[in-house]
Image (spheres, helix red, strand yellow):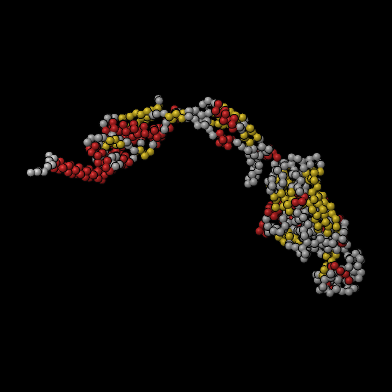
Amino acid sequence: MEGQRVEPKPAGGGKGKKIAIAAGIVLGVLACAYVGLCAWVGSSGAIFPHTVVGGVDVSGMTVEQAASALDQAVAQHGDQMAGTITYGDWRGTVTADQMDYDWSASAQAAWQDGRDSFFAQGGLYLARLMGQEHRVTAWSVSADAVDRLVDQMQEELGEDATAASYELDGDELVMTKGRTGVSVSRDNALDTVLDALDEAMERKLGQGEEGYVEAERELQPQETPPQEPDFDEIYREVHTQAKSAEMDPETFQVTDHVVGVDFDVEALRAAYEAAGEGETFSVPLELEVPKETKESLEGKLFADLLGEGSTVLTGTANRQFNVKLAAEACNGTILLPGDEFSFNGRTGSRSAAMGYKSATVYSGGKTVNEVGGGVCQTSSTIYYALLHTNLEVVERRNHGYNTGYVPEGMDATVYYGLTDFRFRNNTDYPVRIDIFPEWQGNKELLICRIYGTNPEGIYAVPESSTFNWQSPTTVYQPDETVPQGTTKVDTVQNPYVGVSAQTYRYVYDGEDNLLEKQDMGVSVYRMRPRTILYNPADGDPATWVDGVPGTGQTTDPNQPADPGTATDPGTATDPGTVTDPGTTTDPGAGTDPGTTADPVQPGDAGAAAGPGTTTDPGAAADPGAGTDPVQPADSGTNPDPVQPADAGGQTPAEPAA
């Protein structure tokens, strides 16, 4: 009989499997227990066992409890726990009560210790529970006490590294090379103090040591070599451009001059590298004194009279008041190099609100009263003085009628908002205008002096030549206020001689050599006829026979005779029966012809008269007075001084000059 082979069963096979299963269950339970422990540790508010902060056992305390315990301990014993740091023979001590501890942060750090990892915190807790001790260093918010300690150490020992230094001494740049220093890091000093204090707290609070407890630590020095200076930065600090003193445009005070300074940067670098630590050496400076120092400029300012001119003050009290008021506005004006003088800009509007009074002006060729009359004498006096300098004329126009108070071609009319008188300081130095009234004998003069600096001794002389003289014609005008059978010369609308003037300015050097002849332009002054008033009932005087009214054809009294067709009084009537045109009221005795610039068309130059009919120009200042330091002005830049005629024969009213 055939039999079957049966495999034998391993001995104890079922039991081993049961053991493996049981072991797995145990491990699972332990794992679950450990996870649960980790979770409990993480959620627990208590600090791990055997945890010490600053010598105080905070085991099992909450953060708040630990912070309170630490605060109380330091409050009670802080002045008896000291940390001392040493550096060579130097010693410095800080007590716990001088430190600004943040016990809340320290307690929080104690609680956080061991809880950085969820799965590790359970094991760390068990280790602490088994007796493993952990110490947490006290946390300091501020290191003010330590900073003061380090400052004291460095002050007493002087061990800081020294940097290179330099100074300017006369014409040398003197430099001292730096030295290597031994210094202590403030962070390192703080850590060292905290460590020493932690030991003192442990001994006092943890071990119960009696009395004053001091722990000592030595600071570790750090060598710091001197830093090489930034030579390019030193050059930027030292290098200076020379600058002359000048007058401040706001205060008109002379500023300080600046001496130019320069040196060789590479020479300084080479000298530094060759010097030893702490050695002093020098390199030469190149000094440049500017053209004008403060002292030299102050000695030159307004030292020279560049030009002078004067006119006689005449006319009504109101007119003279206006002339002086305008002069006061211009007096003391300072023009820096390149500055421009504007008469209208200095005086402003010549209005009643500005204090001006009513005086004669010209409007449409007629003499009328208007506020501000007379100021043209002020502008003309300044222009007359200016012609004795070499200052640049920017804008100038002549009057419509010859003024008489300055030579022909040397006046300057103004009208606010329409016509200005301007000139520029084209010298290298400030210029000052002085203009003021002054009595000389029985005459009151308006005097203008222009001061500046004239190192070259340059001066100018103005000259003018006249031509196209035209004596006043005679016109007749009816006036019912004139008694019948008589005539009357109009003393308001005074006659003026027409004339043209060519003006030149001759510029000389200090040795009287002619440098330039400057063309200052042509001035054309119109003629104004003499006006004879008559009663219209007598008829036009041009029709009278033998100068007797009513003996000839009578002109319609309502229709004035045409001045252009009137019989020449010198031929149609007996010259002796009327006032000779040459012997009429002196033009200077009536309204001052300089009261305004009337830019109407000049009179017919064909009827020339002798220059003796004008106001004597000798009343003006000697044109030879004054000097000017500047270069000759380009005569081409001068504006045309001839005021264009108005096609209608009417011009705006203008204050009298």
Q: Can you name the residue that lies furthest to the front here? A: 1
Q: Residue at position x 32%, y 33% from top?
A: 198
Q: Nearer the viewer, residue 624 or 580?
A: 624
Percent x, y for residue 266?
59, 31
Q: Nearer the viewer, residue 300 or 219?
A: 219
Quadrant for the C terminus in the image? bottom right
Residue occupying image coordinates x 69% and y 58%: 417
Q: Is residue 623 visible?
A: no
Residue 624 spot, x, y in % from top left: 80, 46
Is residue 274 something one can see in this rendering? Answer: yes
Q: Is residue 353 left or right of residue 591?
A: left
In depth, the one of 332 and 116 nearer the eye is: 116
- Which quadrant would the N terminus be assigned to in this image? top left
Among the 4 quarters of the image, the one containing residue 35: top left
Question: Eyeballing the image, is 394 above or below 239?
Answer: below
Q: Residue 120 appears at what percent x and percent y? A: 27, 41
Quadrant in the rendering for residue 626: top right
Q: Residue furthest left?
A: 1
The answer to which of 325 and 631 lies nearer the viewer is 631
The part of the image, by quadrant, that contains residue 480 is bottom right
Q: Residue at x 61, y 29 (%)?
A: 284
Placement of 22 over or under 415, stated as above or below:
above
